[in-house]
Image (cartoon, helix red, strand yellow):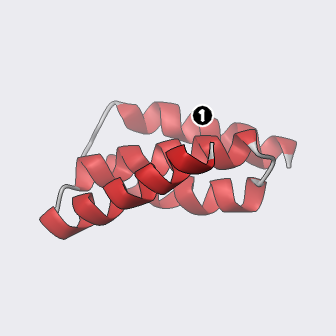
Amino acid sequence: MDEAIALFNQSLEIFEGVGDDQGKAMTLWWLGHLAEQQGEYTKAISYLQPALEILQRLKSPDAESVSASLDRIIRNS
C-alpha cells in the first residue's frame, strides 16, 4: 500500500503541475480511500474535502460518490 500511496502522491504533483483539476480530485479521492483503509480518518478527510470541493466546482457526477465517502468516514470516526 505504501507504494500505491507514493505513486498517487507523484500523480498529484503532476496533475497540479499541469493544472488538471479533475485528475487532482480523483487522485485525492484515491488517497482518501487508502487513508481510510489504514484507519487514518483525519487524513482521509483532509484528502476528501478538497476532492469534493473541486468536483462540485467542476459539476462532476463523481462529487456524489466522494460526498458519500466523506459522510461515511465522518460518521464512523
- Residue 23 left/right relative to 52: left
The image shows residue 3 at horizontal and vertical percentages of 54, 48
State the residue position of label 1.
68
Instruction: Locate residue 53, reporting x and y percent.
Output: 41, 57
Residue 71 placement, left or right of 63: right
Residue pictured at 72% horizontal, 37% vertical: 72
Q: Residue furthest front?
A: 3
Q: Residue furthest right?
A: 77
- For residue 18, say whether it is visible: yes
Q: Quadrant of residue 63?
A: top left
Please say whether residue 51 is visible from this viewpoint: no
Looking at the picture, tell me which residue is in the foreground, 63 or 17.
17
Image coords of residue 55 (percent x, y): 34, 47
* x and y, in percent, of residue 8 in the image: 43, 51
Q: How many numbered discs, if any?
A: 1
Tell whether 6 sits left or right of 53: right
- Quarter of the rendering occupied by the N terminus: top right
User: Toward the viewer: 22 or 53?
Assistant: 22
Find numbered disc 1 in the image and state the secondary structure of the residue it sits on: helix
Give, as a three-letter code, the residue at label 1.
Answer: Ala
Few, some or many residues within 10 Å of mark 1 (<14, 14–19, 20+): few
Front-lying residue, 3 or 71:
3
Question: Residue at 36% of width from left, 59% of height from top?
Answer: 10
Q: Nearer the viewer, residue 32 or 11?
A: 11
Q: Could you tell me which residue is drawn at 38 percent across and 33 percent down?
A: 62
* Image vertical order of residue 51 relative to residue 36, above or below: below
**Which residue does the image show at 81% across and 47% down from the upper left?**
39
